[in-house]
Image (cartoon, rainbow, N blue to C red):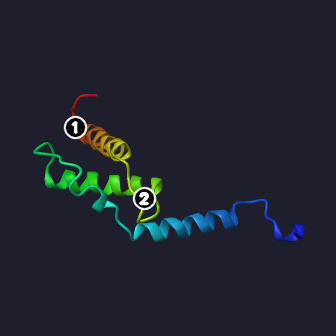
């Protein structure tokens, strides 16, 4: 390989990764939650939507293939992480709320 074809910066790698993320953005992994996760009355409709989108994003990073089966423990981890992020964000936005 000719040394002139190589780069000392991230050009090709960052362009490729950016395109991968762009393609994943149009997909959804919410179907992995259907029938497997039940929130009960703990979350409002808006909060459920936020958790679903966060979990979908996390699962796309872990399992980029649409046909890959998501194990229960990975799904549980993603849901817990999304709910904790939702709780933490609401505490930050609360004026005069607990620290």
Residue 52 image offset from top left, x and y in percent:
27, 55
Tell me which label, 1 or 2, sits earlier in the chain. Answer: 2
Please tell me which residue is depicted at 29% across the width and 60% down the height of the picture: 30
Name the quadrant of the C terminus: top left
Give the number of the mark in front: 1 or 2: 2
Position of 26 with respect to 97 (left or right) is right
Residue lying furthest right in this view? Answer: 2
Vertical comparison of 49 with 19: above or below: above
Going by the image, does 60 lie left or right of 3?
left
Q: Secondary structure at mark 1?
A: loop
The residue sitting at 39% across, 71% down in the picture is 26
Is residue 81 positioned above or below 70 on the image?
above
Question: Which residue was labeled with disc 1?
Answer: 95
Q: Which mark is residue 60?
A: 2
State the SS at label 2: helix
Kindly report the distance in space between the C-alpha atoms of the residues bearing marks 1 and 2. 34 Å
- What residue do we see at 26% from left, 39% from top? 87
């Amino acid at each position: 390989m000719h040394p002139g074809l190589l780069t000392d910066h991230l050009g090709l790698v960052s362009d490729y990764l950016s395109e991968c993320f762009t393609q994943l953005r149009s997909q959804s992994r919410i179907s992995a939650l259907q029938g497997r996760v039940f929130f009960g009355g703990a979350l409002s409709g808006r909060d459920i939507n936020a958790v679903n989108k966060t979990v979908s994003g996390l699962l796309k990073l872990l399992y980029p293939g649409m046909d890959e089966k998501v194990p229960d423990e990975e799904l549980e981890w993603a849901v817990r992480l999304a709910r904790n992020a939702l709780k933490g964000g609401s505490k930050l936005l609360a004026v005069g709320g607990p620290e």
